[in-house]
Image (cartoon, grey):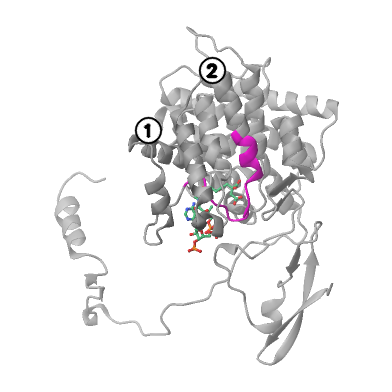
Amino acid sequence: MKKTATLIVDGKSYELPVMVGTDGNRAIDISRLRKETGLITYDPGFGNTGSCTSSISYMDGEKGILRYRGIPIERLAEHSSFIETAFLLITGELPTKEELSDFSAMLNDHSLVHEDMRHFFERYPRGAHPMGILSSMVNALRAFYPEIPERSEEAEINKAFARLLSKLRTMAAMSYRISKGMPVVYPSYFLSYCANFLNMMFDSAVRPYVIDEDMVSALNVFWILHADHEQNCSTSAVRLVGSARVNLYAAISTGISALWGPLHGGANQAVVEMLQEIYDRGGDPAPFVARAKDKNDPFRLMGFGHSIYKNYDPRGRIMKKMCYRILEKRDFNDPLLDIAMKLEETALRDSYFIDNKLYPNIDFYSGMFLRAIGIPLDMFTVMFAIGRLPGWISQWKESREDPRGKLCRPRQVYSGPGKRDYIPIPERKPKEVNGRRLYPQSVEKTFETKYRSSASYL
Ligand code: SDX
């Protein structure tokens, strides 16, 4: 196979190096393109652009493959724990028994949150979305804990990672309890990472939470499935912001904000809201499928389609099985699950979904799973964030250690007005676009009458 690609521009040909990945995937290295040709590439959404080389996770979208550090997701879901998988992602290797127990002990040591932070939660506007709270609180951690200077000792860096992994889980439970006016439950030395989370969420002085090992192992699998996923939107946000050498907490806070979007991690909440709407309207998914196919309708079938998977999302298969198992165990007959099944069947028979290779993704079933274990709807994406944290940390670490690592600064194709003069304000005429003024008169007038004259300012 040729090691270069030939580009011909204005009759001149250029040889561009071709890189080959571990599994044979190839990429044209265009890092010298502008210098040699004066041209840039154009790829909105970066669907055809590799931003880095990475050895953390590997996906084959056509075959529906996902591996973490080379290990198939199915094997990790069957045999590993979330903490062991986090260790694998961050260090590159599975831990020995001793390494795993040291790592768990370190997570335990850092599981408490500074007591002053409780005031942040208590004073945060009630009804705020937990993802907004989480993103703010993670950024606030920088005020309590030192950042990782450029030349940090490995031990210092690992402590910061353990601190974040443990405290994010504690803060998630804390924000839920405080938002409901319930007393905060502290992490217990005697419980594992996942059992601790369930206990911090649901324990009560009047009805002690009974740890159900099936729930704990299902939550381990849920978080393993979410732990990393190549250069997805939120991971790319962490890498891009991290490239400016901001502190770890600020970079992770950006990842949480990106994950919040309904097209990304927010889809697990949006799927359940969509299924609930189908249920409320009588349970027939056909009108929703029709809307999803209508190019004039911005509606998307939540939980369907994927930027990379043009096959069934391997994580979705595992999630679907787990969902059934938990619902059966809890003897919980969720009407939304029946609707989800009907919707999946309808869509997978429809040529629009078949032709566009739109299959259920991880979010399609994860919402039903979270409902089955009692997680409130607005905490669904927080659960995704806790799972994705080891991935964000490992990607942040890898980009920071990359000798070719540079400040991320994409280019653009300019499509605005050509050079024009500055017009003095008396000579300017109001502009109309599609018959409407650029800045509607009514808003200016309202502003004048409503705010300038009254004493109350927002
Ligand atoms: C996650 O990147 C990751 O790895 C993300 C993630 C992770 O672990 O980090 O896997 C987590 O974000 C999963 C995705 C969750 N989002 C949703 O379920 C929201 C619904 N899905 C879509 O909005 C959509 O599928 C995207 C955003 C996920 C992908 O959109 P793309 O890249 O446009 O998908 P595509 O190129 O395969 O689409 C082909 C066609 C397009 O139509 P045309 O523009 O060619 O006319 O299918 C259409 C799309 O508009 N299409 C859909 C659709 N998804 C794509 N039409 C209706 N419903 C959908 N869900």
Query: Considering the image in quadrants, where does the C terminus appear?
Result: top left
Relative to 294, is 208 on the left or the right? right
Residue at 58% from the left image edge and 71% from the top image edge = 411
- Nearer to me, 24 or 39: 24
Query: Considering the image in quadrants, where does the N terminus appear?
Result: bottom right
- Can residue 131 be seen here? The reply is no
Q: Which residue occupies the extreme top position in the image? A: 206
Give the magenta-colored segment's residue range: 302-320
Which mark identifies residue 185? 2
- Can residue 238 be seen here? The reply is yes
Secondary structure of the residue carrying tag 2 is loop
- Nearer to me, 261 or 282: 282
Image x and y of residue 12, in percent: 71, 90
Image x and y of residue 257, in percent: 51, 46
Vertical relation: 353 (above or below) 227: below
Residue at 58% from the left image edge and 72% from the top image edge = 42
- Name the amino acid, label 1: Gly
Which badge, 1 or 2, comes first in the chain's sequence? 1
Secondary structure of the residue carrying tag 1 is loop
Q: Is 310 included in the stretch rendered in magenta?
A: yes
- Name the amino acid, label 2: Val
What is the C-alpha distance between the residues marked 1 and 2? 20 Å
Name the residue carrying label 1.
127
